[in-house]
Every structure is written in structure tokens, then in C-alpha cells.
Image (tube, grey):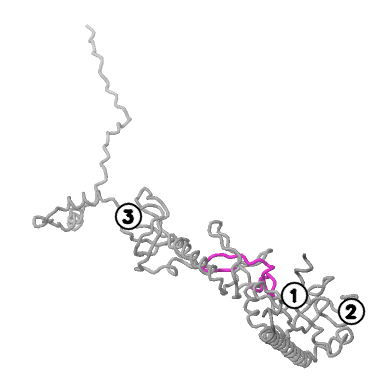
Amino acid sequence: MPSIHSPSTTRLHSTVVEAEPTTEKPAAAPQMTRFDRLKAQYKGPRVVVNDSGLDFSYADFDDAVQKTDYAFNRNDVVKGIVVQHDVSGAIVDIGAKASAFLPTLEAALIQEQGDDISNLVDVGAEMEFQIISEEDENGQLLVSVKRIQYKAAWERVVARQADDEVFEAEIIAVNRGGAICSVEGLRAFLPGSHLAGMMPTEEIIGNKIPLKFLEVNQEDNKLVVSNRRAVVEQQMADLSRGDIINGMVKALKPYGAFVEVGGMSGLLHISQISYDRIDDLEKVFQPGDQVKCMIIDHDKVNGRIALSTKTLEPEPGDMLKDPEMVFDKAEETAARYHERMEAERKAREEAARDIVLGLGDSLDDLADDGANGEGSSDPLSDVSDSLDSLLS
């Protein structure tokens, strides 16, 4: 029998190597040192609160603080202490739950350019503050020093106006209508027409000049001042009738010339220029001419003066012929004029005294005649009888 061979089993091996699954282990945390472990566990010093000897506990105190009503309202004025300067202001302790804040713009009424909070209020300074806001979400209030100073400045201005006094103030700015002056820290308007002897240009900024009030209205925040009125008042106090003054012709009118005398405007009437008749004033004066005049009258209340040059003429008509000669001899001629006026005054007084004495003598004679004569003692009885006969 043929031999039967059983099929041999052949094993096939794959050449592909199967990858074994790997598990990545997380990076091990750095091992803490003993110092780091102690630092992490440290909770600070333990304070043991013992309130057994007190009438109240810390919890009671906290409840009392929360229940306290501080009653800080807008516009209230409170005392406080500046405790710290900040970038845009200062921290102020006014006794509220939270510290109040004082903005730099509210730290003072008068502030120079470039001032910061350290130039305006000192740390530790105790002063009054006005509350200008409600509490914010953090319970903080805004306060102001400027508004308290503003109110006090207006009170001083009103008092000055009542006294009608002359005061000095600095010009801080100019505009087309005039100038701005600082009066007690308030901005006052000085109209150009009330500047004496100067124009509202930048050259006058920084000058201190005498002023008087023209208008004070706190409700409308309106403050108007005058330099001319102050100058006139000061100069009028030193002026008297008969004084010789220097001036400049400012304007010509049909009735005379206006002469500026130290910031004041005096009228040189055409009838007071010369004893001779003047047909054309422009042939005598021109605006800008320097003149010498005598004061013949003045109104110190309204700052008005009346001037004359004819009283300075050595001979009538000299002002039309040679005005320079008249001005050169003004003091000499004025002295003679005063002597003549004084002599005339004394003559008038003597004449008036003689009239009074003559009337006294006449009355005495009438009284004597009435006492010695028969009938009525009334010296006017005959006159009365004559009047009665005429009226009957």
C-alpha cells in the first residue's frame, strides 16, 4: 500500500513587530523642603482674645459700629485731618466709616499754575471741609476746602463794598473789553473805560493797581471794579480850587476841551480859555497838546473838575497869541491872581460889614425917634396907614 503522508503543518511568522502599549507617567512634583512645608502651614501668630474682664465683647463693639448713624450730608461743613497725599488729591479723616477724598481742584481757592496737592494742604493739618457728594459704593465722600474759601471771599467783598474803600488787586488777564483782576481770589472784571492812564494790553498783566467796586452781585457771580474811580478819589483828596495842574487835551467839543489830569477828565470851557473871544477852538488846541490849567471848581463825589487858562493870562488874549508864554508864567500869574482875588474878597467883606453896621445904626435911630416922639412907637406905622388908605 502506498504510504500515505500526512500534510505537514507549516507555521508562518509575521515579520511585523507589535508595539507594546506604554503608559506615560506624570512628571513628579518637585519635592518640598522642610522649610517650604513649614511656611505653607504657618498661619501667623495666634492671638488669644480675652474679653472676660470687659463690659462688652469685640462682637458687641462691631455691632455698635455698624449701627452708628454718622449723618454726613451734602453741603455739611465738618472738621477733618489730612492723613495722606494722593496722586490726584488727599485722603481726609472726617470721622466717617471711610476716609473722605479731597480732589486737588477743590483744595484751595487760589492756586498757581503747576501747584500739586502737597503745595496746597499739609499732611496732619486739621481744617474745615465741605461735603460735596453723596457716598459712593465704598462709602467714601468727596470734600472741598475751595468752596468754604469761596464763600468767605464773597463775605469780605460785600463788607468792602459797604465801606466803599480803595483797595489794591493784581491784573491776571486781559481781553477785548478790559482786564480781569483777582480780588480775594475771585475774578473781577475791569472795563477798559475804567482803566486810568493805561490800555488793556498784555503789558499790564501782573501789575497791582488801586480799585473800587462798581457792582457786587453774589447771586449772579458778578464782580465789576474801576481803577479810574479809585484814582480820581485819591487825587481829588489832594486837589483844591486855585491849584495849577498839568494835563493833556483829550478831545475837543463845540463848548470846550476835555483835559486828562492824572486819570481824571476835566472840562476847560471855551469861556475859560481866554478873555478874548474864540471863534475856532481848533486854532487854539489840538488833541494831545500839553497844557497848564487852574482848577476853578471841583466835584469830589463825582470826580469832576472845572479848569481855566484865562486866569493864567498876564494880559487878556495871551492864550491866543502865545500860549507857551502863558504856561511858562503860570505859577507867577496864578500868584498875582490869588492876591487879586483875596483883595477883592476882603473888599466885599468890608462892604458887607459896612452895610450891616449902617442898617444897625438906622434901626437904632428909628427906635430912638419912636421912644421920644408922641403917639405910636412903631416906626412902620405910617407905612401901614398909607397901605391901608391905598387898599380902602
Q: Nearer the viewer, mark 2 or mark 1?
A: 1
Question: Is the residue marked by circle 3 packed among few (<14), some (14-19), or many (20+) residues within 10 Å?
Answer: some
Residue topped by disc 3: 98
Horizontal side of residue 65 vs 16, given as left or right: left
Q: Nearer the viewer, residue 206 or 347?
A: 347
Horizontal side of residue 182 vs 78, given as left or right: right
Spatial separation of the CA atoms under disc 2 and disc 3? 87 Å
Residue at the top extreme of this rendering: 1
For the N terminus, the image quarter is top left
Spatial separation of the CA atoms under disc 2 and disc 1? 50 Å
Element at label 2:
loop
Report the amino acid beneath label 3.
Ala
Counting residues from the N terminus, which is met first, the one under dot 2 or under dot 3? Answer: 3
Task: Give coordinates of residue 45: x percent, y percent.
Answer: 16, 58
Residue topped by disc 1: 383
Q: Nearer the viewer, mark 1 or mark 3?
A: 1
Task: Give coordinates of residue 169: x percent, y percent.
Answer: 57, 72
Residue topped by disc 2: 277
Q: Nearer the viewer, mark 2 or mark 3?
A: 2
Residue at the left extreme of this rendering: 52
Q: Quadrant of residue 120?
A: bottom left
Report the amino acid beneath label 1.
Val
Task: Give coordinates of residue 156: x percent, y percent.
Answer: 49, 68
Determine if residue 243 is in view: no
Question: Is the residue marked by circle 1 packed among few (<14), some (14-19), or many (20+) residues within 10 Å?
Answer: few
Task: Classify 109 as above or below 315.
Answer: above
Horizontal side of residue 366 vs 313, given as left or right: left
Spatial separation of the CA atoms under disc 1 and disc 3? 102 Å
Task: Classify 116 as above or below 316.
Answer: above
Residue at the front extreme of this rendering: 374
Report the amino acid beneath label 2.
Arg
- Over which residues does the magenta segment extend? 181-204
